[in-house]
Structure formats: structure tokens, C-alpha cells
Amino acid sequence: MKTKEDFIERVLYTEEEIATRVKEISAQISEDYKDIEKPLLTVGILNGAVMFYTDLVRRVSIPVHFDFMIASSYDANTHTSGKVNILKNLDNDPKGRDILLVEDIVDSGTTMNYLVEYFKDKGANSVKVCALLNKPSRRKIDVDVDYCGFEVPDEFIVGYGLDFAQHYRNLPYLGILKRSVYSK
Ligand code: IMP
Ligand code: MG
């Protein structure tokens, strides 16, 4: 039987490299939000951001509240559809809150641009984006990535939560998917 590793072209970031970077971002977030009045509303974008989210928030030293959304601009393949659907919304009222959107990867920018504007419209006190990965070469819509783990090349990346058609999310590292997997 094939293992998950048979589909990986090469490892981009190891478990250890990810952990080191995530700790740095958590420290920066703790510092930047140390004076806010209500707990920081950390919003994980399901499913891809789950691993990043849990590792990140456990290292944040200021009070946080958990919330999650499902938003999709993506088809099952590697082509973005350009339209954003909110399939699961927040449980908290965003009005007056400081919101930190925690996302796996900003690619075309469609999803994050939409969600930032959406929460500003809903009266959030502030909205920032924290993305594990940023692929600026693919940007179609401008979006500020306030906290970024790593800038990555224009390759399809899986692992540490990121999938290809729901596969490979549980790889503990970030790797480039072999092109043969999706160009068949
Ligand atoms: P955007 O709206 O085009 O920025 O798309 C963001 C979403 O596309 C991410 O949350 C991922 O679900 C998906 N995505 C984009 N690039 C990759 C990749 O290289 N690997 C896995 N998922 C990706
Ligand atoms: Mg996603």
C-alpha cells in the first residue's frame, strides 16, 4: 500500500520549523493585542486552519475566545471559483470585537478579502488576518496579511491541515504535492 509520502514532491517546512515560526507569531499577537478590553476573538477557518489554529492560540498569552467559520471559495480541485460562501458563521456577535481571522493559506485573496469586509460591515472593532502561508504570486484581490507564517512559491501545498480533495491534512509537515497527483 502506498503511504502519504509517496505523493509528496518535497518537504517545504518540517514540524520543528513550523513550531518555531508559530511560537514567534503567537508572541507577536500577544504583544500587539495586550491592551484590548474584551478577549481577542480568534476565528479559525475550517477545515484547513485547524492545526495552525490550535498550535497558535495555545501559545497566545492574552485572553482569547474561540470561534470557527466555514467559508469556501474553492472547488474540490485546485481552481478557485471566485465566489465566497459562508457555510458556517460565527457563534459570537462580531460587533465591537477585535477579530483575528486564522487561515491556512491566502492564495487569490478572495476568501480573506470577503471576510475582512464582511466583519467590518458587521461593526467589528478591528479585523486582522493571520495566515500560515501566503502565496502572493497568485493574488487576484488585494488583502493585508497581518501575520504570515511563510511565503510560499506557486505550488500546491498540503499537510499540517492543508488538503488536496480532503487528502493529506494529517501530514505533520508542509510539503509540495506531486503534480502527477492533480494533472491527471
Ligand atoms: P483564496 O480565496 O483563493 O485565497 O483561497 C484560499 C483557500 O484556497 C485556502 O483556504 C485553501 O483552502 C485553498 N488553497 C489555496 N492554495 C492552496 C494550496 O496550495 N494547498 C491547499 N489549499 C489551497
Ligand atoms: Mg481554506
Image (tube, rainbow, N blue to C red):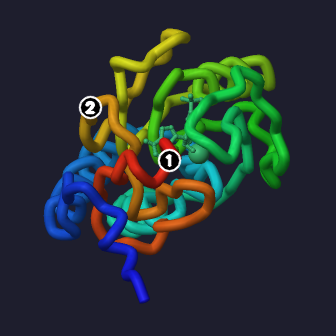
Question: Residue 140's x, y, as percent?
Answer: 52, 11
Give residue 153's mark.
Answer: 2
Relative to 69, say whether 66 is above or below: below
- What amino acid is labelled 1 in the image? Tyr
Most foreground residue, 124 or 78: 78
Q: CA distance from mark 1 to mark 2?
A: 17 Å
142 left or right, relative to 178: right
Determine the secondary structure under disc 2: loop
Question: Residue 165's x, y, as percent?
Answer: 61, 56
- The residue that appears at 52% across and 57% down in the rendered structure is 163
Determine the secondary structure under disc 1: helix
Residue lying furthest front: 184
- What amino acid is labelled 2 in the image? Pro
Is label 2's Cβ within 8 Å of ligand 1?
A: no
Question: Residue 103's x, y, as percent?
Answer: 51, 44
Mark with earlier residue (1, 2): 2
Give residue 182's mark.
Answer: 1
Q: Residues within 10 Å of mark 2 (few under 14, many from 20)?
A: some
Q: Nearer the viewer, mark 1 or mark 2?
A: 1
Contact (CB < 8 A) between labels 1 and 2? no
Most foreground residue, 49 or 8: 8
Most foreground residue, 121 or 162: 162
Task: Report if residue 18 is visible in the image.
Answer: yes
Count of numbered tags? 2
Give residue 63's mark.
Answer: none
Is label 1's Cβ within 8 Å of ligand 1?
A: no
- The residue that appears at 27% across and 47% down in the rendered structure is 25
- The residue that appears at 33% across and 29% down in the rendered structure is 154
